[in-house]
Image (cartoon, grey):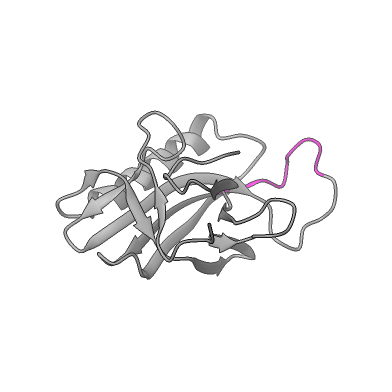
């Protein structure tokens, strides 16, 4: 079964897709995630170059990407202490701006945004080995058949 025009993403409270849903103007996917820049291929065993971002991807009711609000919170090996508090505060601010926010399953089209040298998006990575496959970046959540909104890590 090929990649659908609208890729379902299930809302799973307490897991990595717990901040997805609907709002007055469409659908959203929000989160906090650490990543390295796309061109950073040097070893980073102590994770000192992890860049922590908050993001909010907005989609219309038909699943078309409208815009993304992404910000760098800081750089460090983990999301603890002040860095973690800042990230949670920023994420709450992003979510609080959504009128009539309701956490729920969503279905969106593929999209790609480059911010600060890091790819964000839902990208078709289908190949002969994995088959039909879509990857969410930078979260690295994989979606595939039966296209039920559940992800693989």
Tell me the residue at 52%/38% (across/down): 83
Tell me the residue at 55%/35% (across/down): 79
Residue 109 at x, y percent in the picture: 42, 65
State whether residue 88 is above or below residue 22.
above
Asked if residue 70 is among those painted magenta in the image, a careful observer would answer no
Residue 136 at x, y percent in the picture: 54, 53
Residue 56 in which image quadrant: bottom left
Residue segment shown in magenta: 44-52
Chief secondary structure of the magenta portion? loop
**Apparent side of residue 113 relative to residue 23 in the rendered image (left or right):** right
Residue 37 in which image quadrant: bottom right
Tell me the residue at 38%/47% (across/down): 90
Name the residue nearer the viewer: 43 or 113.
113
Tell me the residue at 69%/50% (across/down): 130
Residue 92 at x, y percent in the picture: 32, 43
Name the residue nearer the viewer: 42 or 60.
60
Q: For the C terminus, give its image quadrant.
A: top right
**Apparent side of residue 109 relative to residue 27 in the rendered image (left or right):** right
Residue 134 at x, y percent in the picture: 56, 56
Asked if residue 47 is among those painted magenta in the image, a careful observer would answer yes
Name the residue nearer the viewer: 17 or 45.
17
**Apparent side of residue 146 relative to residue 39 in the rendered image (left or right):** left
Total numbered labels placed on residues in the image: 0
Extreme right residue here? 43
């Amino acid at each position: 079964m090929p990649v659908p025009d609208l890729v379902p993403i299930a809302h799973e409270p307490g897991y990595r897709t717990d901040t997805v849903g609907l709002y007055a103007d469409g659908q959203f996917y929000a989160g906090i995630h650490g990543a390295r820049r796309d061109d950073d291929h040097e070893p980073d065993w102590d994770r000192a170059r992890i860049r922590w971002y908050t993001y909010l991807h907005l989609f219309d009711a038909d699943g078309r990407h409208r815009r993304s609000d992404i910000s760098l919170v800081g750089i460090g090996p983990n999301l603890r202490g002040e860095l973690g508090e800042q990230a949670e505060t920023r994420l709450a601010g992003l979510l609080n701006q959504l009128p009539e926010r309701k956490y729920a399953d969503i279905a969106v089209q593929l999209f790609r945004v480059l911010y600060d040298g890091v790819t964000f998006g839902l990208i078709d990575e289908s190949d002969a080995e994995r088959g039909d496959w879509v990857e969410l970046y930078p979260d690295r959540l994989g979606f595939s058949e039966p296209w039920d909104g559940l992800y693989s890590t």
